[in-house]
Image: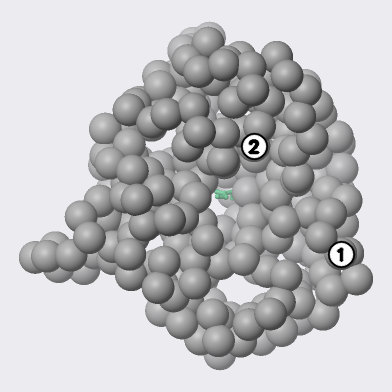
């Protein structure tokens, strides 16, 4: 596999948290705290949809990228309550999270739908952050690598190497999300290496060397450095700890 220098990427998935005024206050704080870190690490925030436009305005010129938390696969039409990828692109989103386990578990997202969403994101000129991860029952049944492989294959169906090289994959074990029980660095590294190996088999070494793989699931300031120190961990997708500027900034610092 070609060795590539991958720029670390730390993203905050705010989920259904923060009103618009709270969102503005949080990024104001965050911007000040990450200003001195230069561009050694890419920092992304994924607020609720309603905060995207105000944050787009507030973040002009700031080294903070915006992400959507999900999108529909059609670009417009009679899909009440849905948001399309071109709409997110217009609001300055560089990334869109697709296939988060909460979408899969609570809203029935399938691998095929995750693939369609990722295609819409790409077609709108943005980069998908494609989430995969096993449940506790699947880990205990020794199914982790099989489940993650199925999810990655499904999400990447029909994409070419040049697309995938620019993508972000996020390994988020479901049992680690919001539980305070993060995967150990060794557990994360094992799955990340398996995902990279799969990308090499599906595409080539160059693509596998370039695709970035984030870890998510109870990432905090005190475990970030160890997780991010693993050779195949290229960043973090942070939930709870991204809701406080100081906590999130500490994780970003751990990535530098
Ligand atoms: P927590 O960091 O709260 O465990 O959430 C992780 C997550 O789901 C990020 O997408």
Judging from the image, the colouring scheme is one colour
Residue 1 is marked as: none
**Which picture quadrant has residue 188?**
top right
Graded by Cα atoms within 10 Å as few (under 14), some (14 to 19) or many (20 or more), the crowding at tag 1 reads few
Q: Residues within 10 Å of mark 2 (few under 14, many from 20)?
A: many
13 horizontally vs 115: left or right: right
- For image coordinates 80% across by 26% down, the residue present is 231
What residue is shown with label 2?
212
Q: Which mark is residue 38?
A: 1
Residue 21 image offset from top left, x and y in percent = 56, 90
Separation of marks 2 and 1 at Cα, in angstroms: 20 Å
Q: Secondary structure at mark 1?
A: loop
**Residue 146 pos. (x, y %):** 46, 12
Q: Position of residue 225 (x, y in %)?
A: 87, 43
| Residue nearest the observer in this picture, 223 or 32 | 32
Q: Is mark 2 within 8 Å of ligand 1?
A: no
Which residue reaches farthest bottom?
A: 21
Residue located at (50% from left, 33% from top): 162
| SS label for mark 2 | strand
């Amino acid at each position: 596999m070609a060795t590539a220098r991958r720029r670390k990427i730390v993203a905050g998935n705010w989920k259904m948290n923060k009103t618009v005024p709270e969102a503005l206050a949080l990024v104001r704080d965050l911007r000040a705290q990450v200003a001195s870190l230069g561009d050694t690490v890419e920092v992304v925030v994924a607020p609720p949809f309603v905060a995207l436009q105000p944050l787009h305005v507030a973040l002009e010129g700031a080294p903070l990228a915006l992400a959507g938390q999900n999108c529909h696969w059609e670009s417009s039409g009679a899909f009440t309550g849905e948001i399309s990828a071109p709409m997110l692109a217009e609001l300055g989103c560089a990334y869109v999270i697709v296939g988060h386990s909460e979408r899969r578990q609570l809203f029935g997202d399938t691998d095929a739908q995750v693939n369609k969403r990722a295609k819409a994101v790409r077609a709108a000129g943005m980069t998908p952050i494609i989430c995969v991860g096993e449940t506790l029952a699947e880990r205990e049944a020794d199914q982790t690598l099989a489940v993650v492989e199925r999810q990655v294959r499904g999400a990447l169906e029909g994409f070419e190497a040049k697309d995938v090289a620019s993508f972000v994959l996020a390994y988020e074990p479901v049992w680690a999300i919001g539980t305070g029980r993060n995967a150990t660095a060794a557990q994360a590294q094992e799955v990340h290496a398996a995902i990279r190996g799969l990308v090499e088999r599906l595409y080539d070494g160059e693509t596998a060397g370039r695709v970035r793989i984030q870890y998510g699931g109870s990432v905090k300031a005190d475990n970030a450095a160890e997780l991010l120190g693993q050779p195949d961990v290229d960043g973090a997708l942070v939930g709870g700890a991204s809701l406080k500027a100081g906590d999130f900034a500490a994780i970003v610092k751990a990535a530098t």
